[in-house]
Image (cartoon, helix red, strand yellow):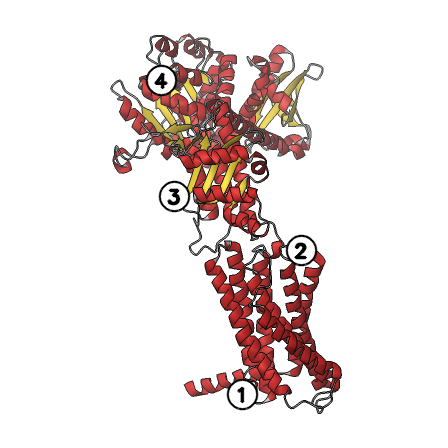
Amino acid sequence: MTSEFGITIIKLAKLFWNFLGNHTFLLCSISSSLLLKAFFLIFLIKNRFYNKAINALILFLLLILTGGMFEDIAWVVKLTQKLLSPNIHNSKLTTFFIRISWGFFVVRYQALALLITSLSERIFRFRWYHWPFVITSSGIFTIFICLAILNLSHRFPFEFTAFGFTSFYLLFPLMLSSLAVTFWKLHSKEIPNLIREQLNVFIRFLVIPTLVLDIIQYYPFRFLGSSANTFSVVGLSTIIMSIAIYYAARKIMGLRFLNMNKRVRSKKQIAFVNALKRAVSQFGTISDERELIYITKNFFSKAFSIPERKIHLYIRKAGDNLIKRSFFQVDQDYQDLELFTDLNHKFILKESVVIADEISFDNFYHRNKQYEAVLSILEKLNADVLIFVQTKNNHVGYIVIERYARAKKRKEFYSDAEHDQMELFSTYLANMIYVLQNKNIDLLLAEKKDLKEELYSKHQNHTQLLESVKSFLRTEQERNVGIIFYKNRRFTFGNKSAHDLIGINLNTLAGHPITKALKLLVQQTLEYKTQQTGFAYDQNGKKLMMTAIPNPEHHNVIISITYPEIAHLLQNKITMLNDPSKWDYLLYLETTNSGKLINELIPGDSEALLNFKTDLLRAALSKRAVLLDIPEEDIDITAELLHNISLREQLEILELHNDTEAIDACIKLFGVNQIFGSQKKCGTPILEKLNKSGTLFIKNIHLLPLEAQELLAQFIRYGFYYLYKTDQKRVSDVRIICSTDQNLKALVQIKQFSSNLLDELNKTTLNMPSLDEISEHDIAAFVQQATHDSPAEHLLELSDKEKQKIIRTRFTSISDLKNRVQQLVKKKTGKTGFSKTTILPASEISADLEYALQLGKNALKDPELMQKLWDHFKNQNKIATFLGVNRSSVSRRFKEYKLL
């Protein structure tokens, strides 16, 4: 099996080898090579890169390309003849071009030899060792040109000998001696690294492949065997050389070959974008120049793969010419740098980023004192890159990258893209240094944090507004107005819209909330003889607006029902706001989920409660720290409400006591350097643990030690904190909620509370309004909330006497008021004789009981339903109370249905 596989591989290799020698394929490949060389020839001529230093290089390149093109033309002519007249060995035209190609073969190699020796020289001059080879090559060229021009039909007996001598002479004495001279120059002369790399690319990817392939093709010509093998070698050689020319040309052009580019070229790096984004975000939180050192080192390490120890930032002191090193040390070398800066101010304004290899290359071809001075200071600093950090009118510092910081073999150069990237970063850095030295950075950071919080608040308001608008858009297709007539204690639908909006039989389901709301509205209309407006909820929980108008002429009441507009919801409440500009929060209370949560906590709508609820919603939609000045019973649920509305994931409660130590509080809140204890021992600081996801609720903020209060005030003001007893700064966006039962202003006066912290907390303080002036309307709202889950809700309404009793009671908190209402409801439940089953939530009551409750007295007409009520209550009095009818009516029906 293995032998068969090997035979197959050999056959495939032979087929491929023969394919390379195919005349058609060879003609196509050589034609492609000819076009490639023609392209580079036209490119050189068109762009005119000529100057005194590189004129010779351009000439040698043109001769190399021209010689190669004549060789390709000779092969094209010969292959064309082979394809058109295969029986003819060589025509006169073919012989002419072959002899011409041999002449230019000599020209190509002589130009190549001169090129590799001239690359290491600033201006090429013929040396003594050039002349023997130039004279010999000229003689050989002349011989082949004469043979071609004379166009002799017969061959000279020494022609093949001349071919062999020529190939040996060019491939060995000429090229080997030229390579030896080039290597000797590289070791004996100070040549820029860019020139060295150009020569390295040129020799590795052009000279050596050319020599190897030509040795195979020309020198052992008589050992190649058949002409098919010769053509196969030519085909393989052409393909390899075309690839080598293209690759080497792209690579060497990127290394500033012939000064075609001002800087080394390369692709832009994605790593730079991420590193710059990180650095810019870090700039936004710094407050000290020392932090710039870390940011700069980190940026260059991530963006350009330079070890941090090789990067140095030197910041000039404001107001003098001395500079500060990484740790604010000054030495002689950097005083020399200051002197250079003063003497070369114009150069620095033009070139803010100086790269040693680029300057060395420019100086190699264009020597001047400016470049010499730059190279001198770079050598003193042992620097690969020197960046002058400057604004438009101020020079504020330097960045120095050590020599060969990232190039292990001195072949990795800084590209034009990296040059621009360094320049861009230095601009950001210069502005940051200038701000630190000339402005109050703390004030800027505070302003930035305020702007971010204001932006967050605007975003939350926008979200709430969209939710409000959507709540109205959902009913846009349901704008029809329903009409209901009430006469002789019966409701009559005036149109189909009324039936669609109500969805129930109002005359049958007497105990349904909508029926009750309509009856109450009708009662008020008939009593006061004026138009009355009320609200109820449809089967889907959407709010309905009901307007009742008395009609004395027909002794009835006309009721219109529709979904309310924004104005309908706000018109009666907006006048109660202390600040009418907060009407939008009033709208959110009525239409959003956040408002629903607050209304569940505080169901009343009196002026005091309404203003408190809008303030509470406004605080919940902000990121600012909040101080809760409310009764202790309401603190936990209010803090949880603020946390839930802000959509944060984790709520951490820190309850302080009189024995809280300052060091313990600081470590718990801000953390500590690991020198003083490991993270496992001290625990993760709260501000780090809750960052971007949590809310911190500090109970009894007045018990926080003063030292911790100052640090907390700094965090609230600027958005960052320091690890306790260190300069390590951390950023966090934890939401802070505080509570106290003390007069903080009085504590500040006796120096037991931080004035800075009080200033921050006073920006958003929630004060619970007094409940002494609670209204009957508020009591009704609390009663409705306490009984809304009960199927006998209509029986548990408090009387006016009971409401007045609650109003006269002095309450300390919302929780206290809710508890008092619930106690009265339970007491009333006991008086009515309801069993525990009766006051279970609606979800736990059978559908039959709920249906009977909605039917009210009409349930007496259904024998099966009466039987189910008896099975449940086992008592006629309880059934009568449940349905809201007399016991005699129940007894009469039981006798009629024979249920006893």
Residue at 58% over, 27% down: 543
> Which of the marked residues, 4 or 3, is nearer the chain's N terminus?
3
**Which residue is more in the foreground, 572 or 205?**
205
Depth-wise, is mark 1 or mark 2 nearer the camera? 2
Circle 4 Cα neighbour tier, 10 Å, few/some/many (<14 / 14–19 / ≥20): some
The residue pinned by badge 4 equals: 632
Depth-wise, is mark 4 or mark 3 nearer the camera? 3
Q: Quadrant of residue 419?
A: top right
> Mark 4 and 3 residues: CB-CB less than 8 Å, in contact?
no
Depth-wise, is mark 1 or mark 4 nearer the camera? 1
* CA separation in Å, label 2 and label 4: 85 Å
SS state under label 2: loop
> Which of the marked residues, 2 or 4, is nearer the chain's N terminus?
2
**Which residue is more in the foreground, 524 or 277?**
277
Report x, y in % for residue 263. Answer: 58, 50
> Mark 2 and 3 residues: CB-CB less than 8 Å, in contact?
no
257 vs 442: above or below: below
Question: What amino acid type is highlighted by mark number 1?
Answer: Phe
The residue pinned by badge 1 equals: 223
> Which of the marked residues, 1 or 2, is nearer the chain's N terminus?
2
The disc placed on residue 49 is 2
* CA separation in Å, label 1 and label 2: 44 Å
Question: What amino acid type is highlighted by mark number 2?
Answer: Phe
SS state under label 3: helix
Circle 3 Cα neighbour tier, 10 Å, few/some/many (<14 / 14–19 / ≥20): few
The residue pinned by badge 3 equals: 309
